[in-house]
Amino acid sequence: MTGNHVDLRSDTVTRPTPAMRQAMAEAKVGDEQRGEDPTVNALQARVAALLGKEAAVFLPSGTMCNEIALLVHCRPGDEVICDRTAHIITAEGGGPAALAGAMVRALDGEGGVYTPEQLADAVRAASRYAPRSRLAVVEQTSNQGGGTIWPADAIEAVGEAAKAHGLLLHMDGARLMNAVVETGVDATRYAAPFESLWIDFSKGLGCPVGAVLAGSAAFIEAAWQWKQRLGGAMRQSGILAAAALHALDHHVDRLAEDHANARRLADAVGALPQLVLDQPRVDSNLVFFDCAGTGLSAAALSEALRAKGVLIGAMGAHRLRAVTHLDVDAAAVDTAGEALGAVVGG
């Protein structure tokens, strides 16, 4: 709940719990740019170990993680290959082009998941006339793909294709821990094929801000320079890193509750004949559905729900997205389902 609303617009609306706030208040801090913040250092070491990488850097956002990774891996004119629904295309303000000077080649995957054959077909032959195919990006889970979880074997197959064609591989791991909790696959297995990847702490893990980018020691050294260039110095950011460490200790396993609540909501949506679920099975904490059958636009339906105390985001002309998170329990999900029924039935 956010105020008097059931807020399903995103898992980024979560607020730190009292226990997380206490951890933040008690954090030991120092100047993180000088390597003197012990809490930031502990978080970076822990995430590097969690993902099986040599080093990591704490950054303000997942978007900055993606953009810094592209800046390290690519040169102006290089081409990045990803699914057409990828966050770097849909939600980063044209950053790959504006910052890295990179072109993006979009693949038409299934639910945001593309195949190794699609990746191989997209790699350009070396030519003075063409951009250099440089980097492939995987988004786990696939947000605009419907919250789809990339299976570990699919990631490994894409990793083999990337290696065979001389591509580097980067994971947008905004909801990687959702995939880990849902599948039971260890984070290090998901991470193994990637030169770089990150996890977000301000979504399902419930922190107020922050993400951690991981990779080789050389990659992270280059990432630090781009962090400085982009104005990413956070100084005594142990206050924020303490929230992330608390989340790793207390908020990972509970992601399963969000998944259960998302399926609960999907059942309510599926029971309304005017609405059509994007995916027959909800993989994680994202529920996408189409409202064309109601005669309402997504924006109009969203506004009607707001009037009933439920916030759901319009993601297109008739597509809506509901996201479950730690501030929304089963009762709140039922309230949202009842509001949907009332609006659609009316």
Image (cartoon, rainbow, N blue to C red):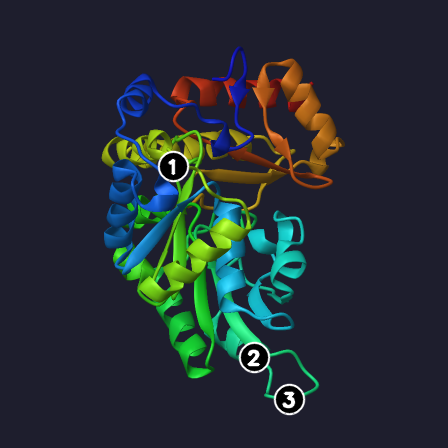
Q: Is residue 253 something that shows in the picture?
A: no
| Viewer-closest of 14 and 292 | 14
Determine which quarter of the picture holds residue 77. Answer: bottom right
The residue that label 1 is drawn on is: 259
In this view, the mark in front (3 or 1): 3
Please report the residue visible at 53 percent of the width from the left and 45 percent of the height from the top.
231
The residue that label 3 is drawn on is: 127
Query: What distance separates the C-alpha of mark 3 from that of mark 2?
Result: 12 Å
Instruction: Name above or below for residue 346 compared with residue 232.
Output: above
Task: Give percent across and percent down for residue 280.
Answer: 49, 46
Task: Give percent across and percent down for residue 94.
Answer: 67, 54
Q: Amino acid at mark 1?
A: His
The residue that label 2 is drawn on is: 123
Instruction: Name above or below for residue 213 compared with residue 189.
Output: above
Task: Give percent across and percent down for residue 61.
Answer: 48, 42
Q: Is residue 201 something that shows in the picture?
A: yes
Q: Amino acid at mark 2?
A: Val
Kind of element beneath mark 2: loop
Question: Which comes before the other along the chain, label 3 or label 1?
Answer: 3
Please report the residue visible at 30 percent of the width from the left and 57 percent of the height from the top.
55
| Viewer-closest of 104 and 286 | 104
Q: Amino acid at mark 3?
A: Ser
| Viewer-closest of 38 and 312 | 38
Kind of element beneath mark 1: helix
Query: What distance separates the C-alpha of mark 3 from that of mark 1?
Result: 46 Å
Instruction: Name above or below for residue 121 compared with residue 151.
Output: below
Task: Give percent across and percent down for residue 28.
Answer: 26, 29
